[in-house]
Image (cartoon, rainbow, N blue to C red):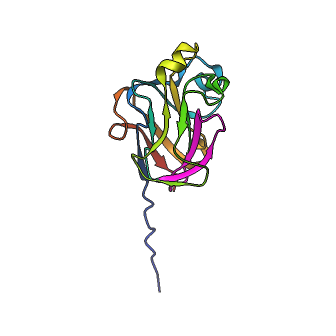
Amino acid sequence: MFMFWKKKKEENVVVDIYAPVTGNAVALTEVPDEAFAAGHMGRGVAIEPTEGKLIAPFDGTVAHIIKSKHAIMLEHPAGLQFLFHIGVNTVSLKGEGFISHVATGDTVKAGQVLIEFDIEKIKAAGYPVITPIIVTNADDVTSDLELITGPVEAGSTVILKAVIKS
């Protein structure tokens, strides 16, 4: 007697990540910081913001918020971990110009304001406001990562598509 088993086809899961800020999305190589530009922090895109609000681009969990409120890490239910870093060298502002609306461990909903920031104050202090959006564990969790550049609107424009490893 012969028995045949039909192998179940594994399907890729594609996760769309929306822009967390409104502005112009560019390649990471445009970020004036070697750690981001060379991809040492992970893969992703950067947005030159035109509005001072960072929103949750998906339902998830706040994994960590930096004490100076210029950066936050969020975890997506699919296992993706993101670093959103407002500006370059803005840690030097010691929280001036940043208002956090969340804390580490909080559950957030897509569209929820995470951090408000004063673009003019950051620029006046001499820091670029370009905001890297990094998938810190892309190599471990994704089999493909498509990055989208150009004008983006927070919460409504997809900036990256991640194919989750099955």
Nearer to the camera, 162 or 123: 123
Is residue 30 in view?
A: no
On the image, the x and y values in percent for residue 112 come to 42, 47
State the extent of the magenta-drawn residues as a range: 60-80
On the image, the x and y values in percent for residue 27 come to 48, 24
Write the residue at 58% across / 15% down: 125
Write the residue at 51% across / 44% down: 101
Q: Is residue 113 above or below residue 107?
A: above
Q: On the image, which quarter does residue 12 sit in? A: bottom left
Write the residue at 41% across / 49% down: 110
Q: On the image, which quarter does residue 149 sit in? A: top left
Is residue 65 in view?
A: yes
Q: On the image, which quarter does residue 55 sit in? A: top left
What residue occupies the far bottom of the structure in this picture?
1
Q: Quick check: is 62 in the magenta stretch? A: yes
On the image, the x and y values in percent for residue 97 come to 55, 27
